[in-house]
Amino acid sequence: MTSPNSPFSGKRALVTGGSRGIGAAIVRRLAADGAQVALTYSASPDAAAAVVREIEANGGSALAIKADSGDVAQLQVAVNKAAEQMGGLDILVNNAGVMVFAPFDEMTATDFDRAINVNVRGMYFAAQAAARHMQPGGRIINIGSNTAVKSTVAGSSVYTLSKTAVAGMTRALAHDLGPRGITINNVQPGPTVTDMNPADGPRAAWILAQLPVGRMGDAAEIAGLVSYLAGPQSGYMTGASLTMDGGMST
Ligand SMILES: NC(=O)c1ccc[n+]([C@@H]2O[C@H](COP(=O)([O-])OP(=O)(O)OC[C@H]3O[C@@H](n4cnc5c(N)ncnc54)[C@H](OP(=O)(O)O)[C@@H]3O)[C@@H](O)[C@H]2O)c1
């Protein structure tokens, strides 16, 4: 249950890809912090509806909007709808992302384009659409990956280049958005237990061996960093990429 004293009381947030995994954890955290939250989904309407029901059962407010992040027009409609329904927009979390993994010789242009469309193009144009609704104090948080810092395995080139683009985009857009009073930062998770990266997946043993802390991350831990970046205390931070990966890239 939120109260007028909740840290994000009165704030309106949109989380792309909020139906599952890290995105759903971010929706839960921002709602628990007192924000009204809208989330997008593309393929998992039941999961999206379940997140909304959970938020509402806890006394919060949430709204699910179907929008494929690979389609800029759908994203723009979703951002505008979220802002209209919530009466404005203060926080955008660009979380929706796809993992594309294949040996170099087998990578297809279709998979390359899908990764770029969702992981880069979608984030860029969602930020553009969201910033148009924001007042000074607005917050944009991208979800990149620690692969932008350290490459550890063959087959990850396209995912890695997409997430490295997210870090570059974040740095450069800080210059566009700073004069408007809007910050933009990039959270770079390491292996975090979700459908994309299950704790018992085929690469789990290899991943654990790369992690100094000896465990994979919990989506709620990533959501905690996002909450900090979405709040008032992070106002002097922009253009930054913050890696939370159990020490994997150190
Ligand atoms: N898990 C990790 O180890 C890890 C590590 C580093 C970075 N990340 C990044 O963290 C973010 C979330 O990853 P995750 O592990 O939570 O992934 P996940 O479990 O696969 O969940 C992905 C979420 O994104 C949504 N999504 C996927 N494609 C979409 C599209 N085209 N349009 C709209 N929504 C879409 C999914 O919704 P639908 O099912 O409704 O389509 C789902 O809610 C991604 O950007 C990922 O690259 C994850």
Image (cartoon, rainbow, N blue to C red):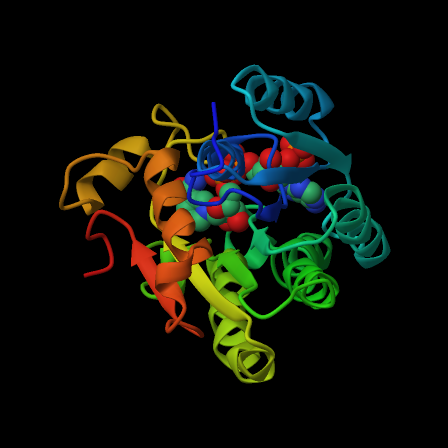
Q: Position of residue 91 (x, y in %)?
A: 57, 54
Q: Is residue 27 visible?
A: yes
Please identify the quadrant where the C terminus is shown. bottom left
* Quarter holding residue 203: top left
Q: Position of residue 43 (x, y in %)?
A: 72, 31
Measuring 36% from the left and 57% from the top, which residue is drawn there?
Answer: 146
Residue extending furthest toward the top: 57
Q: Nearer the viewer, residue 200 or 80?
A: 80
Is 171 left or right of 133, judged from the image as shown?
Answer: left
Measuring 51% from the left and 78% from the top, which residue is drawn there?
Answer: 174
Q: Is residue 121 above or below residue 15?
A: below
Q: Nearer the viewer, residue 188 or 151?
A: 188
Q: Is residue 101 visible?
A: no
Q: Nearer the viewer, residue 73 or 129?
A: 129
Is 172 left or right of 117, judged from the image as shown?
Answer: left
Measuring 51% from the left and 58% from the top, which residue is drawn there?
Answer: 141
Q: Position of residue 97 (x, y in %)?
A: 58, 48
Quadrant assignment for ligand 1: top right
Question: Tag count in the figure?
Answer: 0
Is 160 left or right of 173, judged from the image as shown?
Answer: left
Q: Is residue 218 above or below residue 230?
A: above
* Quarter holding residue 213: top left
Q: Position of residue 94 (x, y in %)?
A: 58, 53
Q: Nearer the viewer, residue 146 or 133?
A: 133
